[in-house]
Amino acid sequence: MDKAKVAEILEEIGTLLDLKGENPFKVRAYHNAARLIGGLPQDLGALVESGQLRELKGIGEALTEKITELWKTEKLKYHDELRASLPSGLIAMIAIPGFGPKRAQVVYKKLKVDSVEKLEAACKDGRIAQLEGFGEKSQEKILQGIEQLRRFSGRHHYHKALAAALGIVEALRGHPATIRCEYAGSLRRCRETVGDVDFLVSAKEKDAPALMELFVKLPGIIAVNAKGETKSSVVLDGGIQADLRVVSEAQFPFALAYFTGSKEHNIALRSRALKHGLSLNEYGFSKAGQEQTARDKGSVIKCCTEEDIYEALELDCIPPELREDMGEIEAAEKGTLPKLVEKENLRGAFHCHSTWTDGIETIGSMACAAQELGLDYLGMADHSKSEFQARGLKDEQIPGYIAETRKLDQKFRKLGVRVFAGIECDILEDGSLDYSDRILAQFDYVIAAVHRGFTMEEKKMTARVLKALANPLVTMLAHPTGRLLLSRDAYALDQRAVIEACAKHGVIIELNSHPWRLDLDWRWWKFAKERGVKCAINPDAHSVPDFQSLAIGVGIARKGWLTKDDVVNCLPADKIEAVLKARRK
Ligand code: DGT
Ligand code: CA
Ligand code: CA
């Protein structure tokens, strides 16, 4: 059991209580506790053992007992009972985007609807629209939500798949029969969501069964779908499917390249091989027309690494993130592949929250964390006043917020970390900003964001964002499409026009590295870069562990062909200030 898992269960308890129509305070207590535990910088085990858990704000007697039980036994009776007390179909219904526990409760009580299928039927025959507080529009939205749920099901957020995969790779590498082991597929290509995880191991043929045996019994594997001599398929914790293939050492680079994909990249590579008179598959190279040879006798060109395979095709080695058949083969042929940004290039982080609004750490703690991460600067940006649910800063709080940031900047400068005062400022429905220019001008930088009014039609939404971008006080554009991966689609927006406007005005576009956002999408970055737009990889951190998402952001930036010169937070502290001020002259 880890913190994230405890947080997930507490979150689910809150939702289930809500579904049962329990007291909203109790519901909120669980949701808050989930967030608190998920973001704890300390070791949860130590807090449990020392009894300090009870001392945390918001963790009372009952929650302490439950968290302790979860931590010690990996189970919670209360959670199991709560789940059992509700129809499973009802629980499944709340996974429909935009359809929360409150609505589920109403349709259950009034119409006895207790599954996604029954809900769909009730929408189609118009019964939902007739319910008080629903109407035609929400009935239509629920149908769209169900459609979305089906489209998303079977895919997983990148960070979840990665966390599950890393443990398994480590365990497989620990087996004496393993020569090499890697994960491949969409996870290795750093796609924003992952279908299944593809593991590869090279070993002697006689050792393959032992590796299969190990794999299907690893902790974190909740079901075995198939177990064969050289291939097995399992379900990992969190419902993620995973395959393991064991291949020979000679075959490994070919299998790794093949199963890394993408399929489109593989096809393009194979047709290039054919032009060289070669056939390429997961077994190796063979003379064109003699595909079986590689499997039986080995590759006609010996390759130890993927690099060797690309070299045989007269190509520079293409990083996995770029293998999407989006121009990488041409670039590898011409020797113009970019030198992609790396995690170590990051020098600072913008768009961070604190206890001034909905973050769970003080600005001081965030600065400490930045220092420990070896960053040279931290850009705070709490919410603006329209975000009342997040306790957005009222006009009269701004001087205090800036003063505290300045004070901490003085203190942390001596420790090598600059602290910038910024604001995540709402773009209101008419495209104006949430504060007067006089107030905005006091910040070191302004990151503008759409947080509500998501249903606007494309033209209006685009005009709204463009108007905000035209204000010279806007330094960056936050999460440009508002999407939440696997739950909420991007709002309608002419992304090309927004990128063009950012290029024209010199607005930096955020690559929000929160694993649910990864927004701006990687598919747009190459274009943005060509237009001269700069990127800021921002953690949107509400807690210290949130900084970890920066690594995922770097993966997505790489996928978008970005180099360290394209990413402003790769600049050293003495260069970044001028970039933040550039528009204000
Ligand atoms: P996913 O799992 O949906 O997130 O995406 P991938 O890319 O991991 O796809 P997956 O797991 O179906 O297959 C892994 C890789 O195997 C894929 O990226 C490329 C290769 N592959 C699978 N099917 C084909 C195929 O029909 N043709 C070729 N050339 N390669 C394939
Ligand atoms: Ca896969
Ligand atoms: Ca697969």
Image (cartoon, rainbow, N blue to C red):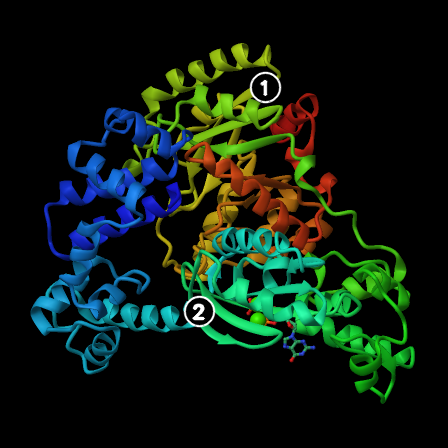
Distance CA(mark 2)–CA(mark 1): 42 Å
Q: Secondary structure at mark 1?
A: loop
Q: Residue at x 67, y 45 (%)?
A: 533
Give the image quadrant in which the ligand numbered 2 is located. Answer: bottom right
Residue at point 54%, 10% (across, down): 410
Residue 189 in sight from this viewpoint: no
Q: Crowding at label 1, few (<14), some or many (≥20) Cα neighbours within 10 Å?
A: many
183 sits to left or right of 420: right
The residue to which callout 2 is attached is 154
The residue where tag 1 is placed is 417
**Contact check, label 2 and label 1, Cβ < 8 Å:** no
Can you say which quadrant of the picture contains the C terminus?
top right
**Residue at screen point 50% across, 21% down:** 368
Residue 388 location, quadrant: top left
Comparing labels 2 and 1, the label whose residue is closer to the camera = 2
- Rendered location of residue 111, percent (x, y): 10, 73
Q: Nearer the viewer, residue 74 or 473?
A: 74
Q: Give the SS element for disc 2.
A: loop
Mark earlier in primary sequence (2, 1): 2
Rendered location of residue 541, percent (x, y): 46, 36
In-image side of 162 versus 128 (left or right):
right
Locate residue 265, reporting x and y percent: 72, 70
Q: Is residue 561 visible?
A: yes
Q: Looking at the picture, tell me which residue is in the foreground, 312 or 563.
A: 312
Amino acid type assigned to the residue bearing label 2 in the image:
Gly
At label 1, the amino acid type is Val
